[in-house]
Amino acid sequence: MLPEVAIVGAGPAGLTAAIYAARARLEVEVFEKGFIGGQVATATHVENYPGFPEGVEGIELIERMKKQAEKFGAKIRFAEVKSIDWDRRLLMTSQGETNAEALIIASGASPRELGVKGEREFKGKGVSYCAVCDGAFYTDEKVAVVGGGNTAVEEALYLTKFTSKVYLIHRRDALRAERILQERLFSNPKVEILWNSIVREIVGENFVKGMLIENVLTGETKNIEVAGVFVYIGLKPNTGFLNGVVELDHDGFIITNDEMETSVEGIFAAGDVRSKGLRQIATAVGDGAIAAVAVERYLRQQKHIEEEINKDGRKIVLVYDPLDELNRRLHMEAVDKEVIVLDRYKYPKLVSKWGIKDFPAVLVFEKGRLTFKREGFSDWKEVREIWQ
């Protein structure tokens, strides 16, 4: 059975949306191109998620969400969504095409790169964006962490479990991380902070051996020897597959309203991929819940129309294209008639079910049975007989 709801991304936002949508008895499929959980799965210790006073490992938290979504019937597919043709309600994935009546984009965000010489050359050879994944490779070595936010500080502290020394490189003279994390960092003897500093180059041969650092106040440069460089300077949204399908902000994040609705009917967004002020597990979960409830309401409206049509008596339906001038004129004329008027983009399931290819279209139902259909007419006179 094809999904009623397709969800792109199996992080906290996507899995929460799956839980809520599946509990509402909707057919749900979650598409994940990588590993379940996204960035959360790489978090060593989550302390600020409600309900876990002692903290919880990121992988454990996300595994619980996954099991809960599957318990209610959501299906998780390991496939990459490569592009979307929403006019046909079609998703092109690495495992083929699939249709859906509604879409929730919860594809998250990825770490930003420094953009300096040597970064890409040594990616996987000393340059990393995940301390949990790679930290153990640097036992008794010196490493550097670039950044000043919560993630950078948390990962620097994590790396002190393995390494002999951790340099924290920050371009300002104060960290953005939460105070409690700063206190832990400042009290750790393995950490040295290089204030007002930026990375100019990462150097090495087959693997990273060091980096060139510049002080932004004095212009002074110096080399420091490190075996690994861990980068945490912000996020970039995973929206490349959208190719202009929905409206994005200047940083590439998806713009939504409070109901998680995007600029396109039937497409919703939740989590870190959405344009907003705070990106945390708790806010992702909230987004996912709101998006799923909004999707359920959106699909229920279509079911309500079907129920109205299936009632006893004669029902006349006009399906029109609001982007076409002639269609809009006929839509206005239909207001004075006893007609159920449907926007083709708001009710794609019904348009597909009734096999409508051209607009406007008039259909007549007798006790729920389709008895008349006329597509692509240009004047009400052409369908006058249906009111006689």
Image (spheres, rainbow, N blue to C red):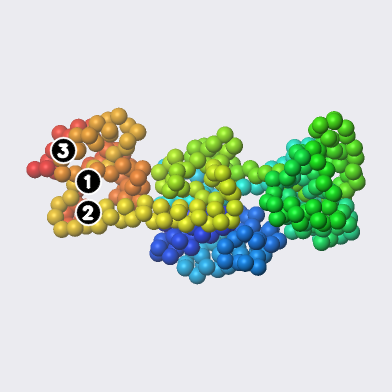
Query: Is the N terminus in the top left, top right, bottom left or bottom right quadrant?
Result: bottom left
Q: Position of residue 387 (x, y in %)?
A: 12, 43
Q: Residue at x 45, y 52 (%)?
A: 291
Amino acid type indicated by mark 3 = Asp
Residue 54 coordinates in the image, percent (x, y): 65, 68
Q: Amino acid at mark 1?
A: Ile
Label 1 secondary element: strand
Q: Residue at x 43, y 51 (%)?
A: 102
Q: Nearer the viewer, mark 3 or mark 2?
A: 3
Label 1 close to label 3 by CB (< 8 Å): no
- Whether residue 311 is visible to the viewer of this picture, yes or no, is yes
Q: Position of residue 63 (x, y in %)?
A: 60, 66
Q: Which residue is mark 1?
A: 340
Check contact, mark 2 vs mark 1: CB within 8 A.
yes
Residue name at image x 40 percent, y 44 percent: 265
Q: Label 2: few (<14), some or many (≥20) within 10 Å?
A: many
Depth order, front residue of 376/328: 328
Residue under numbered circle 3: 336
Q: Which residue has dot 2 on it?
A: 309
Give the camera-side residue of 373 and 248: 248
Secondary structure, mark 2, is helix
Residue density around tag 3, few if under 14, some if 14–19, many if 20 or more, within 10 Å: few
Q: CA distance from mark 2 to mark 1?
A: 9 Å
Q: Nearer the viewer, residue 203 or 222?
A: 222
- The residue type indicated by label 2 comes to Ile
